[in-house]
Image: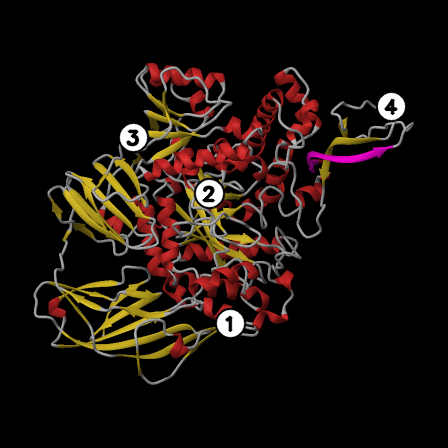
């Protein structure tokens, strides 16, 4: 499958040390610029300048009109969305971003989900309203005549017998009617969107919500505007139902869907016939959604010379595809040029034993395998890039360590385009809170954002080189998710199998029946599943029941050609001749990396390129971990923090590594000559035992109507290492400087200043010279021993998060709950990061 190439999808087939140290803007993280207030040229310039200082080189404007969610997410956007004045303001921002060398995406909606132009499609075309399956109950007395309502498809008595129009009831009966429910501006607080299984609705969306941009910014497509992004488009929920779909179903399958409506709606125990009907129905709905919305918008976007990006709703659990409104996550994602996932509400978070995810109380989600859906789809269409929209509603206390964990968690699973939420336009009054974190200079430690952005650019670059080398693939049993017999059970077993593969150190993709159907037939006979850039020689089948016969036939051909199929045993497992049936994956597969101290919380990724391979190892423990890696090739370690390249110490074919929680080791294996620095092994250490003095320098607080960032003038005073709250108060968010003197050790070569634990960002100054900023562990600085004097002065500026200011402020008490929709849940998150200070111990390693 040959893909059209766009500037944003630039493929890297070789490694460049210069490009790694200073990546192109195409690898820059893309920030969400929420237009939620009155827009002016003066404020636009001011905020773009601030973004530049924060190292933000790419962004997109997410307009949030007043009509978006007026009583749920109140906004003050002026000029109004899609008016001439709005487009003029958008054009001005685009030109100003161009002047600063920034790239932009075009966000396709006003708010979210995509597809309705913030209600305008249905205001112009109410005939495109969403139609879905619903039920209602009625009671009829004896002697009454049943009159079927016009929207009713079929009705049933309590005993399951259908009721015909005109039926005379002999006794009192309860009737359940299954009808086509039309949703048209049902909730005044949310602008409605149309039925995206209808091609005409998509055409109206493009006409009203996308084409009007062309006279203003059409000349920027493929230049500074590098992509178009769609956000959570959905088909009607819970089950799409309209006359045209029912007619199409009957034409395709030879029977009516009407008798199976109770089973479609999960109101009757699913029979074997009902399961087959459900499978055929949701398969058809998925095709209609993909063909009539995603593919239609993609054609329009590609015509403008840019790639189409996006993600689905509820994409963290594939088995929820029906309630999430996409019906088939992989099928949908494969239609994008750059498929993506959404990571909000702490769906990924550094906890070894995460709790089940619950929107209602805002607790942490399970760290699932779902980023692999986007990266697998990318490989299967021949693409190199997969994206994430991350960090929305993580709270004001999200640290850079946590951000690194979230991004690396996804990068090790194939994500390499990072979209972060958010930079708010409106920042006053009740808009001082919202979908946090807010990446502004005033928000305490986020003034150091440029350091983290440089890290993400290098991560994006190095994870975009070559192709993923995932020879193993995990089967996603879509038919079992659709059948409705044991959806959650099969879904949980699918995800458990994925986690088992990760625990064994096996990088893998996810595939489905569509991949088997579209795979290269010649390769299939040779024992290889080949589609796009994907190459699979081992397939793992989790417990399932409803695998299509055509898929079983393809797997048997694959096995006969030398391919390997591992089938997890279950009572209703399909019969696949030649498959290896097992109760466990342990001992069945070999990791591409030999870890000498195996750890179930280490994750592995591999990319192959023209001159070698790149290995990625991510520590998903909450704590630091030590281990060894056996590699006999020419190995270089790439430092994502600094852009430096080191030759690691290899002893007896083993590299010893130590990774902080969420840290990633990147090992480049190539026979090509690569400029590198020698690694220094520090064998001695001295802890700085002299007393530290401290003074606050800057305070961030949440004022009555605005953020306040003010200088603090105070004298140095002694302070113990650890949480600084006894000195500064629990409500303090801001910065302070620790100062200490120390004697230089008697040594030559390099020394390392190790600050130990820091909450949360810092800048070290040695004898008046800045050593740079550190925003996440390890907080270390390597310098030449020549730079030291006999007596040395070390100053360490430490900044914590804005969480303290948010937890203890009373500024929001005057606002109504509906004006602060995310605040109650984010308060739970804020309390996790209200510490601050230099914890140490501070050591000199030499």
Nearest to the eye among marks 1 and 3: give it. Answer: 3
Distance Cα–Cα, label 4 vs label 2 = 51 Å
823 or 55, which lies in front? 823
Mark sitting earlier along the chain (3/2): 2
Q: Is residue 136 magenta?
A: yes
- What residue is shown with label 1? 808
Of all residues shown, which one is farthest toward the bottom?
Answer: 715
Q: Position of residue 240 (x, y in %)?
A: 65, 32
Distance Cα–Cα, label 2 vs label 1 = 34 Å
- What residue is shown with label 3? 589
Mark sitting earlier along the chain (3/4): 4
- What residue is shown with label 4? 166
Query: With respect to residue 224, does 137 lie above or below?
Result: above
Which image quarter is the C terminus in?
A: bottom left
Q: Secondary structure at mark 1?
A: helix
- What residue is shown with label 2? 341
Q: Is residue 611 magenta?
A: no
């Amino acid at each position: 499958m040959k893909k059209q190439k766009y500037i944003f999808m630039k493929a890297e087939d070789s490694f460049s040390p210069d490009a790694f140290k200073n990546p192109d803007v195409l690898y820059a993280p893309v920030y969400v610029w929420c237009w939620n207030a009155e827009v002016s040229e003066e404020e636009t310039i001011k905020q773009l300048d601030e973004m530049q200082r924060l190292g933000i080189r790419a962004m997109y404007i997410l307009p949030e009109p007043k009509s978006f969610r007026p009583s749920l997410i109140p906004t003050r956007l002026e000029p109004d969305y899609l008016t001439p004045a709005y487009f003029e303001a958008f054009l001005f921002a685009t030109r100003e971003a161009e002047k600063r060398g920034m790239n932009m995406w075009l966000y396709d909606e006003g708010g979210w989900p995509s597809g309705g132009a913030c209600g305008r499609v249905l205001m112009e075309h109410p005939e495109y309203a969403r139609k879905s399956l619903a039920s209602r109950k009625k009671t009829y007395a004896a002697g009454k005549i049943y009159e079927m309502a016009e929207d009713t498809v079929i009705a049933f008595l309590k005993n399951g017998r259908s009721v015909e129009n005109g039926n005379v009831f002999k006794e009192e009966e309860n009737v359940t009617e299954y009808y086509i429910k039309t949703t048209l501006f049902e909730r005044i607080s949310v602008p409605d969107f149309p039925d995206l299984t209808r091609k005409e609705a998509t055409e109206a969306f493009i006409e009203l919500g996308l084409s009007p941009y062309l006279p203003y910014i059409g000349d920027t497509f493929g230049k500074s505007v590098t992509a178009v992004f769609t956000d959570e488009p959905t088909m009607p929920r819970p089950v799409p139902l309209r006359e045209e779909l029912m007619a199409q179903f009957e034409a395709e399958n030879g029977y009516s869907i009407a008798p199976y409506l109770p089973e479609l709606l999960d109101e009757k125990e699913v029979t074997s016939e009902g399961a087959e009907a459900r499978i055929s129905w949701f398969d058809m709905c998925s095709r209609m959604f993909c063909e009539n919305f995603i593919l239609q918008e993609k054609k329009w976007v590609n015509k403008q010379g840019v790639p189409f990006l996006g993600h689905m709703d509820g994409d963290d659990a594939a088995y929820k595809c029906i309630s999430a409104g996409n019906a088939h996550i992989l099928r949908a994602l494969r239609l994008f040029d750059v498929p993506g996932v959404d990571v909000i509400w702490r769906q990924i978070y550094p906890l070894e034993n995460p709790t089940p995810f619950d929107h209602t109380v805002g607790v942490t989600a399970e760290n699932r395998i779902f980023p692999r859906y986007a990266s697998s789809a990318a490989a299967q269409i021949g693409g190199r890039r997969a994206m994430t929209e991350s960090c929305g509603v993580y709270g004001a206390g999200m640290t850079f360590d946590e951000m690194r964990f979230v991004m690396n968690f996804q990068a090790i699973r194939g994500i390499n385009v990072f979209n972060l939420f958010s930079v708010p336009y409106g920042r006053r009054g009740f808009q001082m809170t919202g979908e946090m974190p807010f990446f502004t200079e005033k928000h305490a430690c986020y003034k150091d954002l440029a350091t983290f952005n440089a890290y993400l650019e290098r991560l994006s670059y190095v994870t975009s080189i070559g192709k993923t080398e995932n020879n193993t693939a995990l089967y996603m049993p879509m038919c079992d998710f659709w059948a409705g017999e044991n959806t959650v059970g099969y879904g949980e077993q699918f995800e458990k199998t994925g986690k088992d593969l990760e625990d064994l150190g096996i990088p893998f993709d996810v595939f489905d029946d569509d991949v088997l159907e579209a795979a290269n037939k010649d390769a299939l006979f040779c024992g290889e599943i080949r589609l796009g850039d994907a190459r699979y020689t081992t397939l793992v089948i989790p417990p399932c029941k409803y695998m299509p016969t055509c898929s079983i036939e393809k797997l048997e051909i694959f096995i006969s050609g030398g391919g390997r199929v591992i089938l997890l045993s279950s009572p209703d497992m399909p019969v696949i001749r030649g498959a290896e049936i097992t109760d466990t994956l342990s001992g069945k597969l070999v990791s591409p990396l030999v870890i000498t101290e195996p750890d179930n919380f280490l994750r592995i990724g591999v990319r192959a390129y023209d001159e070698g391979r790149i290995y990625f190892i991510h520590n998903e423990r909450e704590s630091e971990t030590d281990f060894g890696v056996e590699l006999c090739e020419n190995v270089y370690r790439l430092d994502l923090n600094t852009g430096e390249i080191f030759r690691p110490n290899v002893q007896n074919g083993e590299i010893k590594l130590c990774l902080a929680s969420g840290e990633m080791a990147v090992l480049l294996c190539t026979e090509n000559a690569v400029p590198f620095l020698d690694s220094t092994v520090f064998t001695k250490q001295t802890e700085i035992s002299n007393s530290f003095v401290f003074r606050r320098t800057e305070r961030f607080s949440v004022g009555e109507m605005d953020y306040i960032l003010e200088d603090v003038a105070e004298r140095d005073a002694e302070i113990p290492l650890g949480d600084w709250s006894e000195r500064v108060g629990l409500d303090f968010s801001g910065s302070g400087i620790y100062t200490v003197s120390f004697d230089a050790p008697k040594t030559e070569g390099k020394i390392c200043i190790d600050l130990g634990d820091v909450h949360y960002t810092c800048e070290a100054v040695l004898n008046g010279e800045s050593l740079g900023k550190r925003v996440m562990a390890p907080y270390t600085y390597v310098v030449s021993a020549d730079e030291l004097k006999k007596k040395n002065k070390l100053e360490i500026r430490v900044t914590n998060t804005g969480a303290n200011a948010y937890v203890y402020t009373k500024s929001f008490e005057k606002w109504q709950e509906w004006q602060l929709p995310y605040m109650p849940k984010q308060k739970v998150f804020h309390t996790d990061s209200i510490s601050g200070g230099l914890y140490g111990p501070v050591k000199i390693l030499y």
